[in-house]
Amino acid sequence: MNTHLHVTALALAFILFIVALVLHKQGKEKAAKIVQMILRLDYLLILYSGGDLIMNYFNGSPMLAEAIVKGIAGIGVIAGMEMTLGKIKDGDSAKVGWSVLIVAFIITIALGFFRLPGGFN
């Protein structure tokens, strides 16, 4: 069940992230701030469900290290989203935020869906 919660929260996070980006680009700062606050609440769901999923590997699983790396990369995705939104809000270059977001996202998806149990494998 937590896998479904985790994937749903991730999908919601990316939808909210895109909406916040669009609102910032349109100059609708108040609406963008509200969406970003909702996104931050969604991060709590992601962290809770992701932490619960990682706990399943603390029973001597040989994939514990990969699960921990995936968790760190997942935190990197959240950090990349926050950096990107913050820089765009301030009118600065968001290249570093986008880079962190994309690299961490690729690592997270590769491990979560293709390496660790519960994905597509």
Image (cartoon, rainbow, N blue to C red):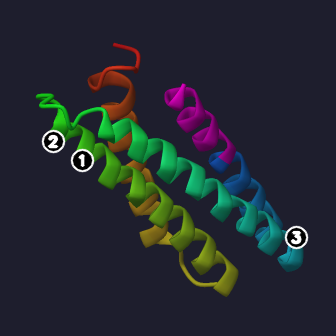
The N terminus lies in quadrant: top right
Q: Is residue 118 above or below residue 28?
A: above
The C terminus lies in quadrant: top left
Residue occupied by mark 2: 65
Considering only order in the chain, which callout, 3 or 1, is on the residue closer to the N terminus?
3
Between the C-alphas of marks 2 and 1, the distance is: 6 Å
Image quarter of residue 77: bottom left
Between the C-alphas of marks 1 and 3, the distance is: 34 Å
Q: How far across and how far down the image is residue 96, in percent?
A: 42, 71
**Residue sticking out furthest to the front:** 59
Secondary structure under the numbered disc 2 in the rendered image: helix
Q: Amino acid at mark 1?
A: Val
Residue range corresponding to the magenta coloring: 1-12
Classify mark 2: residues with Cα within 10 Å, few (<14), some (14-19) or many (20+): few
Residue 2 within the segment the image draws in magenta:
yes
Residue plotted at (55% across, 62% down): 81
Residue occupied by mark 1: 69
Residue plotted at (47% across, 68% down): 97
Between the C-alphas of marks 2 and 3, the distance is: 40 Å
Question: Which of 47 and 116 lies nearest the eye of the viewer?
Answer: 47
Question: Which of 104 and 61 lies nearest the eye of the viewer?
Answer: 61
Left or right: 30, with 59 as reference point: right
